[in-house]
Image (spheres, rainbow, N blue to C red):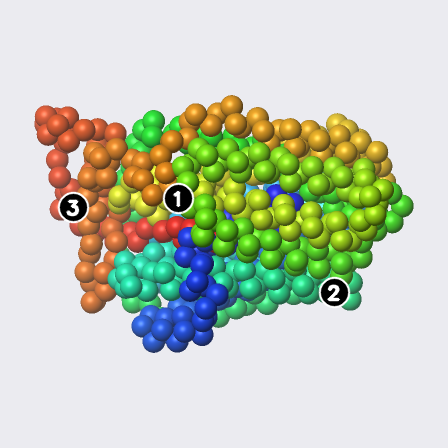
Amino acid sequence: MEPQDDGPLRLQEPAAAGCGGVIGKSCVASPCRWLRRLSRKLHWSFVLAVVAVYGACQGVGNAVGGVAAGYYWKDVQRVQPSAAQFYQGVTDAPWVVKPLWGLLTDVVPVAGYRRRPYFVLAGVVGVSSMLMLSLHRGLGIMPALLALTAQSAGAAIADVTVDALVAQNSITHPPLASDMQSLCGFSSSLGALVGFSISGLLVHSMGSQGALGLLSIPSILVLLAGILLKENHVAEFDYKQVHKKFYKAIRSMGTTLKCPEVWRPCVYMFVSHNLSLDIQGGMFYWYTDHVVGPGFSEGFIGLIFAIGSFGSLLGVLLYQSALKDYSFRSILLWGQVLSSLAGMLDLVLVTRLNLKIGIPDYFFAMIDNSISQMVGRLKWLPLLVLCSKLCSPGIEGTFYALLMSLQNAGLLMSAWWGGLLLHMLNVTRMEFSNLWIAVLIRNISRLVPLTLLFLVPQSDQNSTLLPAEMLECDTTEAVRAGSVEFSVLVQEDSGCISPNMVAEDGRTKMLDAEIDDVESIPLVSKSQTIDS
């Protein structure tokens, strides 16, 4: 899920983690060239899966779903902004448990296939949940919350599964890695632009429930991708060994997390997201209020976030061309400061100072959202680079999903803290007199994580962060049926243990032959940006 600071978007990482680093020239040059090359080398069904998940499900789906869900809680369920903020956090919960989906698709094949069944499952869950939500007009809050959470779970499962495919193909076809990441980023960005452009019109013409019902179309594409995906069949899989594979992967992740080089920046990332209070629920209600607020229409709400997508894309290109060589501390320092300053634009809008200086609400709101999304992207990208450098060999994919989940947990908590703040300040459906205080507190809270910046490594973004002994962990390739698959084969005592200590420990030994049958393909999340 990609978190953005000022849009009614679902929590997720941004669209393809890792795509931002390669989204430069090749991403804007010739997408048709990527499609032809990838279709020829990897099969057209892989391209269909990427476009279905990143373009349709995450791009268009998250854009339309974000706007439609905001109107659904406001106009259909008629809940208070604080409650809508809390419900949004609940629906984002499946993204917090991404390592679980990663472990399942890595080590538990279904009917002899590792990826296809999980695409099918994600599609079926998404279609059924959105059809139930749109066809039942009198649906209560809890069933509606369950349906939206199920749809989010389907999107998370599809995201993890396509990440695993990208990782697998990056290993077997290294020259195609950048093309795959560019395709992921381009599909997500284009999908978001299209989704935001039509979201307001759909809500206006069909209502929020009708627009949410259309989210079944991206899920159908994911289901179709699962049916058509070309994948080798796994014969004679021993399901009795599944618990051992889970245990080895979890133990390896736990050992890695104990290293100071890993847990220190993890603490900073979690706190940074946790304290960036999300009050978008209150801002959305104020946007659409015709008495106190500007009273933006459904179509204009979609237009605001569509234009904001250009700011997000500009942030990616700016980072790639000018900022990727700066040290982690310096770029995160300025990212937090600029995030706080960009939030002050909301304060100007809420207090109507823009009208006093002659700037219309609609124009200032578009500038506000564009700058906020650009700064949010600049803050998010170095964190994703940092996460990619904290993964030890052998468990890169699942551990990356764990780090993404840690950040998503921080974002979920920020949504709940924001909802509590709106409730304490008595910001309701009709009362917005204290909304400016919530905006000010949010902006100040974004500066608090700077006190923990010392936990972040001082090295530049091109340096190796893990100690040498961790980088010497062995990984094994298993060749079957002519295809190469990564195995999560980790030494029993791998982690922050020096080679000398390992040699002296009589209990330490090389990988046992009994685990040679492990063919767990790590889920390597797009080592990117969020682009999720």
What amino acid is found at the position of numbered circle 1 in the picture? Asp
Q: Which residue is mark 3?
A: 514
The quarter of the displayed image where residue 342 is located: top right
Q: How far across and how far down the image is residue 194, in percent?
A: 62, 65
Q: How far across and how far down the image is residue 185, in percent?
A: 47, 59
The quarter of the displayed image where residue 112 is located: bottom left
Q: How far across and how far down the image is residue 316, in percent?
A: 50, 52
Numbered badge on residue 201: 2
Task: Mark 3 or mark 1: name the one nearer the start of the chain.
Answer: 1
Q: Is residue 418 visible?
A: yes
Q: Residues within 10 Å of mark 3 (few under 14, many from 20)?
A: few
Q: Are marks 2 and 1 in contact (CB under 8 Å)?
A: no
Q: Are marks 3 and 2 in contact (CB under 8 Å)?
A: no
Along the line of sight, the residue nearer the viewer: 325 or 74: 325
Which residue is painted at 65% across and 33% down in the image?
443
Task: Mark 2 or mark 1: name the one nearer the start of the chain.
Answer: 2
Task: Mark 3 or mark 2: name the one nearer the start of the chain.
Answer: 2
Query: What's the CA distance linking mark 2 and mark 1?
Result: 42 Å
| Image side of residue 412 versus residue 442, left or right | left
Residue mark closest to the camera, 2 vs 1: 1
Which residue is painted at 66% across and 58% down in the image?
307
117 above or below 411? below
480 above or below 345? below
What amino acid is found at the position of numbered circle 2 in the picture? Leu
Q: Which residue is mark 1?
A: 325
What amino acid is found at the position of numbered circle 3 in the picture? Glu
Which residue is painted at 64% across and 36% down in the image?
341
Q: Is residue 57 visible?
A: no
Q: Residue furthest right?
A: 291
